[in-house]
Image: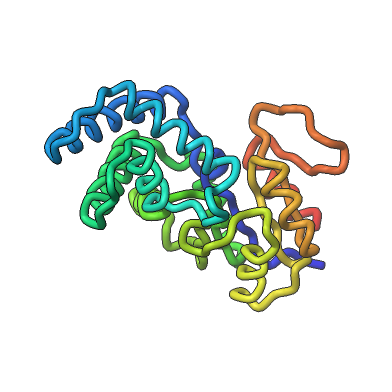
């Protein structure tokens, strides 16, 4: 059946993750958190804050605490808990803003090649969307707006807002229901087999692995390592 809608993963698909920029951002962010907490009367070292922040992030990345969906608010609350600081609404909100501010300042941007492909797909009449696991969402939208392609997407589903993560079928079914299409008319593209391939296939949708480094994958997984291949794949459907 002909593809009518195409969804993209966000991080490391639409927006490449520059490890050096992320490392620098986390260092600067930890310093800012230390400064903020000191103003509130708490004296923590840079090392303490950075270690606990990393610990909480890794825990959420693998398995959200108490089965709650990943959000920056929950992460910040857990960091405060580990620092033995009683959480207060205004403090949590201020720290969330710091986390968002420093992620934005890291300077991550949309892959230039995919921008052109997205424009072509839109011109051809495809419905476009984003399905991404992320503790945020606000910064992600801002990066798209800065690039000038935010309006090309008809729907953006960030797990922190939706309350469900890939590969759960529910988040992909939200796309199906929104576009009023059949599952087999949806194509999803992302960089993680367990999330971006298994999830869509469970509901009968199509899936492509974004694999720019050409890593070895299972034989039954369709993968591409440049964005022009996506156009060629669609032409063959």
Is residue 160 left or right of 193 when viewed as pictured? left
Q: Position of residue 21 (x, y in %)?
A: 39, 27
Which quarter of the rendering shows the C terminus? bottom right
229 or 220, which lies in front? 220
Q: Position of residue 196 (x, y in %)?
A: 68, 49
Residue in the image at 59% along x and 45% along y: 63
Q: Nearer the viewer, residue 226 or 207?
A: 207
At 33% from the left edge and 36% from the top edge, which residue is drawn?
83
Q: Position of residue 137 (x, y in %)?
A: 42, 54
Foreground residue among 98 and 74: 74
Q: Residue at x 62, y 74 (%)?
A: 179
User: Whole-percent x and y of residue 60?
Assistant: 52, 43
Task: Choose between 29 and 109: the one closer to the eye.
Answer: 29
Q: Is residue 119 visible?
A: no
Q: Using the image, determine if residue 47 lies above or below residue 199.
A: above
Residue occupying the point 87% across, 43% down? 220
Question: Horizontal placement of 62 versus 15: left or right?
Answer: right
Quadrant of the rendered structure where residue 78 is? Answer: top left
């Amino acid at each position: 059946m002909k593809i009518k809608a195409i969804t993209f993963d966000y991080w490391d698909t639409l927006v490449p993750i520059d490890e050096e920029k992320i490392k620098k951002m986390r260092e600067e962010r930890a310093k800012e958190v230390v400064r903020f907490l000191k103003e509130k009367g708490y004296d923590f070292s840079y090392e303490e804050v950075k270690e606990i922040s990393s610990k909480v992030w890794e825990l959420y990345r693998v398995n959200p605490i108490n089965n709650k969906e990943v959000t920056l608010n929950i992460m910040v609350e857990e960091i405060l808990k580990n620092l033995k600081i009683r959480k207060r609404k205004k403090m949590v909100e201020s720290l969330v803003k710091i986390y968002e501010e420093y992620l934005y300042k890291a300077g991550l941007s949309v892959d230039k090649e995919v921008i052109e492909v997205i424009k072509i797909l839109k011109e051809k009449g495809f419905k476009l969307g984003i399905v991404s696991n992320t503790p945020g969402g606000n910064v992600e939208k801002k990066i798209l707006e800065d690039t000038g392609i935010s309006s090309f997407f008809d729907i953006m589903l960030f797990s922190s807002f939706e309350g469900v993560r890939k590969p759960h079928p529910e988040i992909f079914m939200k796309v199906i229901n929104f576009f009023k299409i059949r599952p087999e008319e949806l194509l999803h593209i992302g960089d993680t087999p367990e999330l971006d391939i298994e999830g869509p296939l469970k509901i009968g949708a199509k899936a492509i692995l974004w694999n720019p480094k050409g890593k070895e994958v299972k034989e039954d997984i369709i993968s591409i390592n440049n964005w022009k291949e996506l156009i060629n794949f669609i032409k063959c459907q």
